[in-house]
Amino acid sequence: MRTIMLRNEAERLNVPLDAVKKTLARAISKGEIQGIIDSQNEELIRYELEELDGLSEKLSSKRVRLRDLAEEMNLKVEQSRLIIDKLMEEGRIQGEYASDGSFVSQTIIKESIIDDAEKNHIRILLHK
């Protein structure tokens, strides 16, 4: 994943920043480019679909600290959250943000609850 500063693109193209934002938003919605516009930092986060596939697998299989994830992807922490939010919106992952700054998948949450119940000899009936 990489980021592109929208202000720099606007200056390079000698067009208003808003024109760059609208053009990129349209290209993203049409599927011409893969990315997310980070309005807060005025950056485009570009990615390949394969990167999202790998990230989905990772996030589904273990607890992941957002700070570590951001560092791995060369993004800001809030940008890693934007990527996770997109994956959840698309239904590619399910989970929750923990108070310690981690993302925990539904699978890991369920496994943890079952493990704790077993340790405490509590019987849980799961409905499918």
Image: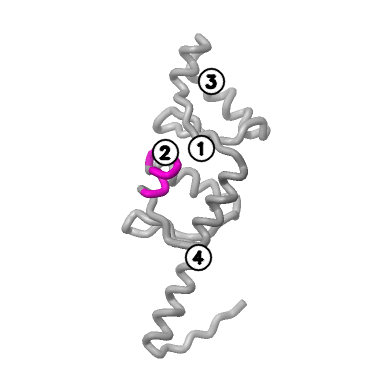
Which quadrant of the figure has residue 22?
top right
> Callout 4: few (<14), some (14-19), or many (20+) C-alpha neighbours within 10 Å?
some
Pick whichever of labels 3 and 1 is earlier in the sequence: 1
Which mark is in front, 2 or 4?
Answer: 2
Q: In whole angstroms, how far apart are the C-alphas of marks 3 and 1?
A: 20 Å
**Residue 20 tag number:** 3
Q: Residue at x 45, y 29 (%)?
A: 43
* Magenta residues, dominant SS class: helix
Q: Residue 71 lies in magenta, yes or no? A: yes
> Callout 1: few (<14), some (14-19), or many (20+) C-alpha neighbours within 10 Å?
few
Q: Amino acid at mark 2?
A: Leu
Which mark is in front, 3 or 2?
Answer: 2
Q: Residue at x 35, y 48 (%)?
A: 67
Which mark is in front, 3 or 1?
Answer: 1
Q: Amino acid at mark 3?
A: Val
Q: Identify the residue at the far front of this view.
A: 72
**Quadrant location of the C terminus in the rendered image:** bottom right
Q: Which residue is mark 1?
A: 1
Residue 75: give x, y in percent of width and height.
Answer: 42, 38
Q: In whole angstroms, how far apart are the C-alphas of marks 2 and 4?
A: 24 Å
Q: In whole angstroms, how far apart are the C-alphas of marks 4 and 3?
A: 37 Å
Q: In whole angstroms, how far apart are the C-alphas of marks 3 and 2?
A: 21 Å
Pick whichever of labels 4 and 3 is earlier in the sequence: 3
Q: Secondary structure under badge 4? A: helix
Pick whichever of labels 3 and 2 is earlier in the sequence: 3
Q: Which residue is mark 2?
A: 75
**Residue 81 tag number:** none
Residue 91: give x, y in percent of width and height.
Answer: 60, 55
Which span of residues is magenta-colored? 68-76
Q: Residue at x 56, y 37 (%)?
A: 47
Q: In whole angstroms, how far apart are the C-alphas of marks 2 and 1?
A: 8 Å
Q: Residue 44 lies in magenta, yes or no? A: no
